Image (cartoon, rainbow, N blue to C red):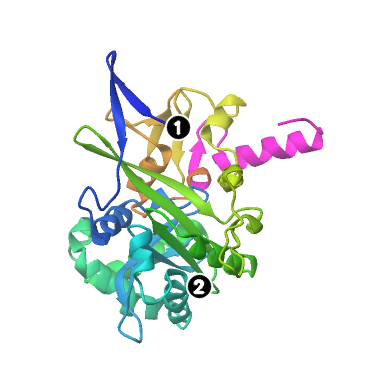
Amino acid sequence: MGLNMYLLDGKQPVKIEDTTFSDIGWKESDIEDVLRKNIDMVCDDEESLLIVGQQVKDETNKRSDLTAVDNDGNIVLIEIKRDKKDIAARKEALEFQAIRYAASCATIKSTDELIKNIFAPYVEKHKGEFADHTDLTSTEIAQRELSDFFEKNGTTSFNDSQRIILVAGDFDEQTLSAVAWINSNQVDISCYRLWPSKLGSQIIIQTEKILPVTDYDDFYVDIAGNSSMTKGSKKDISRRTLPKIDKLMEWGIVKEGDVLIAKGTDEKAVLQKDGQVMLPDNTKESIQQWLKHVYGWSSVETYAFAVDEKTGKTLSELRRDYLEEKVSDNSDI
């Protein structure tokens, strides 16, 4: 029996209907545009990302969907497909297409090269989104944005390795099997499932990180093509990350009413009971969304850039101190 979900509108339940991107008329370009502006939907809030390219051509004249850099200075390729049908219809396997793009990006040896060939053309295409720098050329804007991103994140190297993020409404088992094997051989490639639901006239988009996982054996497909994945293996797909804001509040590290400061700025917000923050204009956002607006990046390493006003420490430092204390006390967390 499937899981039915309802939203209570007053006392009247409204059913949340499962759907697909095809059914609601979305193209791959629609998903791409949503992710371009909200890449934190498919990346961890323990990292910072800056989108620097869209539909970038490689040496064979084929185009990658989105290009980013992370807080370690690595280039990140994001490839998008609507569903299994789109993946199966490709002449070239999705994961190998992405690897080819990543190999092309590995030849970029300097930030000047990245700016000239990828970031400046991206800025030119979306110049209205860089309204604070209207007096500058696209190249100058790209230089400032990248320099600011690296400086604030303490980035000391550039493009030592490349990462890949695959996004689809659903994945076939062969793709997951290949990605699991590639990951187990030290190539950083992630799979995120992203799918829509309907609530009346509204569209709700949910995301789930499928890979990487702890045990890749769950995703290997044998030579005969039989999947070793079982119905009971879904618990192994869960996202493994450090404790989030709900745990920090539960542990008493921070609490409702605490003031958070965006690191290196005078921007402040007040922590709310639900883990979001209240801004000075009385609007409420997630910590990630607030920091995105402050810094103007595609995604912000949330816990490293949110500072607790009363201690002067970042949430990352407070969390680390708490965990280290528990380990030294040999206590259960």
Label of residue 158 in the image: 2
Which residue is identified by label 1? 1
How busy is the neighbourhood of tag 2: few (under 14 within 10 Å), some, or many (20 plus)? some
Residue 21 location in percent, x, y?
Answer: 28, 51
- Residue at image position (44%, 26%) is 274
How busy is the neighbourhood of tag 1: few (under 14 within 10 Å), some, or many (20 plus)? few
Instruction: Identify the magenta region.
Output: 304-333
For the residues marked 1 and 2, what is the alpha-carbon distance in whole angstroms? 50 Å
Residue 91 lies in the magenta-colored region? no
User: In the drawing, does residue 215 fall left or right of residue 192?
Assistant: right
Image quarter hosting the N terminus: top left
Q: Which amino acid, by three-letter code, is at mark 1? A: Met
The residue lying furthest to the top in this view is 11
Please tell me whether residue 101 is drawn above or below residue 333 in the rendered image. Answer: below
- Residue at image position (33%, 64%) is 86
Residue 188 appears in the figure: no
Residue 140 location in percent, x, y?
Answer: 28, 71
Viewer-proximal residue among 124 and 274: 274
